[in-house]
Amino acid sequence: MKMNITFCGHKLGPQNRISKIRSLPYAFTEQGVAMLATIIRTDVAINVSIKIMDAFVEMRKFLASNGQIFDRLINVEYKLLEHDKKFDEVFNSLHQEENIKQKIFFEGQIWDSYNLIIDILKRANNKITIIDNYIDDSILKMLTKKNKNVEVIILTSDKSNIEKIDVNKFNKEYPILKVSKTNKFHDRFIIIDNKELYHCGASIKDLGKKCFAINKMEDISIIEKMVTQK
């Protein structure tokens, strides 16, 4: 009669039982110990099997009686991971806020000033207002970095060099952009979600060509007055 047994998860037939046993297992399962106990008849093997079975029983009791503690530990670990993530977000936000609050760029710092403008534009969740009399289509490349579905309003003068056809093409892929002409502003500003106001010392198209500064203005009460100056 052929008999197959399971040894530590391996099904063994009579022909390969000895060769498989030569490969030492990593661990014994409870079922594997029980099956070994029916095969190995020595007193030492029986005593060891009993002790191992007792260990499994005690382990099961321990897990059952301390299940709630393990659940709480898992919940604590998840909360710690969430807190770590929130701390990272806060520190990143503080670091970004420090960089944006006031920055001076010197001639040749084109990439650095460009990156700061991109960081400001990415802060918007709903609306971006750009006030710049000398805007050109270079702003469109920057606005491709904005968050999805953020509305953009550009207030500029007749001196700007941005074509209607460029605006139409932009809107087909990155809506919504509106350009309005006005002569009521002298300086350049960026308004984010009608909550943050940045003063730009140079036109966005001239970033890095000369020494200029970008400042975040603390008095946001003037934002409402500015957006009504169209």
Image: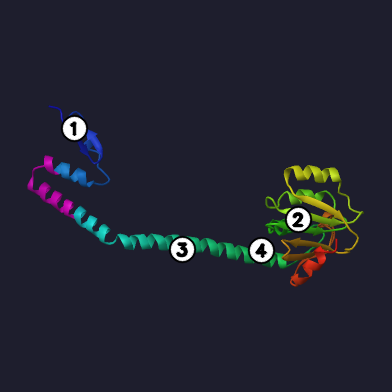
- Residue type at numbered disc 3: Leu
Q: Nearer the viewer, residue 16 or 227?
A: 227
Residue furthest top in the image = 1
Q: Which mark is residue 4?
A: 1
The mark nearer the N terminus, 2 or 3, is 3
Q: CA distance from mark 4 to mark 2?
A: 15 Å
Comparing labels 3 and 4, the label whose residue is closer to the camera: 3
Comparing labels 1 and 3, the label whose residue is closer to the camera: 3
Quadrant position of the N terminus in the picture: top left
Q: Position of residue 170 (x, y in %)?
A: 77, 45
Residue under the image location 73 percent in, 43 percent down: 173
User: Looking at the magenta stretch, what is its main secondary structure?
Assistant: helix
Q: Is residue 2 left or right of residue 81?
A: left
Crowd class of label 2 (few under 14; some 14 to 19; many from 20; radius 10 Å): some
Crowd class of label 1 (few under 14; some 14 to 19; many from 20; radius 10 Å): few
Q: Which mark is residue 96?
A: 4
- Residue type at numbered disc 4: Gln
Q: Nearer the viewer, residue 155 or 74?
A: 155
Q: Position of residue 224 (x, y in %)?
A: 78, 67
